[in-house]
Amino acid sequence: PRVAVIVVAAGSGTRLGASAPKAFVGIDEHSILRHALDGVASAPSAQVVVVVPAGREGDARTEAEAAFGDRSDLVSVVTGGETRQRSVAAGLAALWADVECVLVHDAARALTPPAVFARVIDEVMRSRAGVVPARPVVDTLKRVDGAVVTAAVDRSPLVAAQTPQGFPRELLATAYADAVDEHTDDAALFAAAGHRVRTVAGDDLSFKITTPADLDRARHLLTPSRA
Ligand code: C5P
């Protein structure tokens, strides 16, 4: 199958408190975007679209060349939008005509293992549904009204959704073209258009780098142990 991966990296990263847009913040000697692209480079993709903030297109091209080497002609760089949904739409607009399966991935999930990409692609091709990598919910959940707990929530039927999320390209493109509301993720937008969504196993390493503590965690995971 002809697979494309859209890497959304156009967020500002306000919660990280860094001066640069989040994807361009360093984890070790490499940025969040570079680590994300190293993971994507291991997937069997025919096209990669990197969506970045206005003014960062040249920097993204440099990162893509470092990650993809002599395959960097697979990579398109486009400018993102105000919301994640608009950034994904900008990525979809840049897909080549022959792409059949599209994955949408948060650059902020920079340490996502290659096996997750493979599981998502295989399940899209097998099921023709939308596919979400999922993890069990570990925290105890409460429903609240302000500071007051109103109910305990049974977590057994719940999962936490990660990326890359995969879709048959035509179905996702149509769902985006018809979308009126903002959705929390691509799978929610896809489901709102009436399509099925399935899960595959996600991975703890696919956590999203959002806060300074998440960045520390990524740094520790990349530091060779001195034991
Ligand atoms: O802000 P958050 O971490 O939830 O964003 C998830 C992903 O979506 C990040 O990789 C971020 O760069 C991307 N994003 C985007 N365009 C926006 C907002 C977020 O590409 N306007």
Image (spheres, helix red, strand yellow):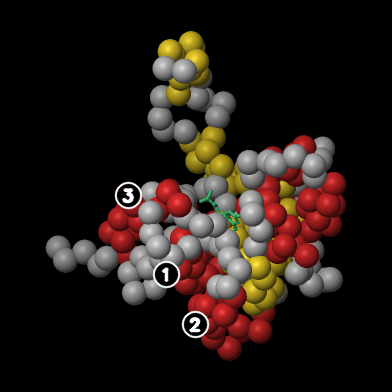
CA gap, disc 3 to disc 2?
27 Å
Residue 132 in the image: state x and y as whole percent.
Answer: 62, 46
Residue 182 in the image: above or below residue 74: above
Q: Residue at x 82, y 38 (%)?
A: 194
- Which label is found at residue 213? 3
Residue flagged by tag 1: what amino acid is it? Ser
Residue flagged by tag 2: what amino acid is it? Ala
Residue 103: quarter of image: bottom right
Q: Nearer the viewer, mark 1 or mark 2?
A: 1
Q: Residue reaching furthest bottom?
A: 70
Residue flagged by tag 3: what amino acid is it? Ala
Q: Residues within 10 Å of mark 3 (few under 14, many from 20)?
A: few
- Which label is found at residue 66? 2
- For the residue pair 82 and 192, the one nearer the viewer reads as 82
Q: Residue reaching furthest left?
A: 227
Q: Residues within 10 Å of mark 1 (few under 14, many from 20)?
A: some
Residue 190: quarter of image: top right
The reply to whether callout 1 and callout 2 are in contact (CB within 8 Å) is no
